[in-house]
Image: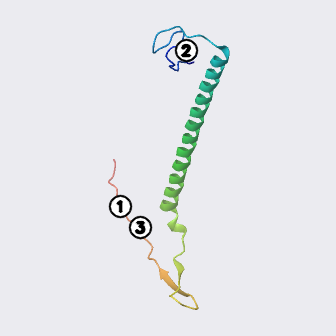
C-alpha cells in the first residue's frame, strides 16, 4: 500500500508508513491485491523448490545408474566386437575386429581371525 504522503510502498498489514511514520489509509482492494500477490510469490517459491528437488533427485538417480553400469556392465559385454571404420572418399566400410583381454581375478589371502 502506497503512502499518500511519501509514496513508500508498505505491506498491507502496516498501520503506519515505515518511511515517514504517517498513518496509512487502508483500502480493502489494495489489501486484497497485496495478499494475492504475496500468495502468488509463495506459490512460485514452493514450485521452484519442488522443481529443484526433482532435478537433484533425477541427477542422483542418473549417477547411480551410470555407476552401476560402469561397475557391473563390462562383464556382460562381448569379448569380440566390430568397430566400423570408413576412410575419406571410401565406397565401402571395413570392420576391424578387436579383442580385449578379460581382467584376471585378483587373489587376496585374508588372515585367520581366530
Residue 57, percent from left and from top: 55, 45
Q: Quadrant of residue 19?
A: top left
Dot 2 or dot 1: first in sequence order is 2
Q: Quadrant of residue 95?
A: bottom right
Number of disc labels: 3
**Is disc 2 surrounded by few (<14), some (14 to 19) or many (20+) residues within 10 Å?**
few
Dot 2 or dot 3: first in sequence order is 2
**In the image, which disc is placed on residue 4?**
2
Q: Which residue is mark 1?
A: 108
Q: Is residue 40 above or below residue 3?
A: below
Q: Secondary structure at mark 2?
A: loop
Question: Given this view, does label 2 or label 3 mark the residue nearer the observer?
Answer: 2
**Is disc 1 surrounded by few (<14), some (14 to 19) or many (20+) residues within 10 Å?**
few
How far apart are the two marked residues, 2 and 1, measured between alpha carbons?
A: 84 Å
Q: Which residue is mark 3?
A: 105
Q: Residue at position x 61%, y 21% from top?
A: 34
Amino acid at each position: 500500500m502506497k503512502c499518500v504522503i511519501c509514496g513508500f510502498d508498505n505491506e498491507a498489514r502496516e498501520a503506519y508508513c515505515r518511511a515517514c511514520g504517517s498513518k496509512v489509509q487502508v483500502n480493502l482492494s489494495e489489501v486484497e491485491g497485496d495478499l494475492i500477490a504475496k500468495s502468488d510469490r509463495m506459490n512460485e517459491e514452493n514450485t521452484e523448490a519442488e522443481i529443484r528437488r526433482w532435478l537433484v533427485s533425477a541427477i542422483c538417480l542418473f549417477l547411480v545408474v551410470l555407476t552401476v553400469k560402469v561397475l557391473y556392465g563390462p562383464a556382460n559385454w562381448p569379448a569380440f566386437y566390430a568397430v566400423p571404420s570408413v576412410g575419406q572418399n571410401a565406397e565401402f566400410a571395413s570392420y576391424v575386429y578387436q579383442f580385449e583381454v578379460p581382467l584376471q581375478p585378483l587373489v587376496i589371502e585374508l588372515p585367520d581371525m581366530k
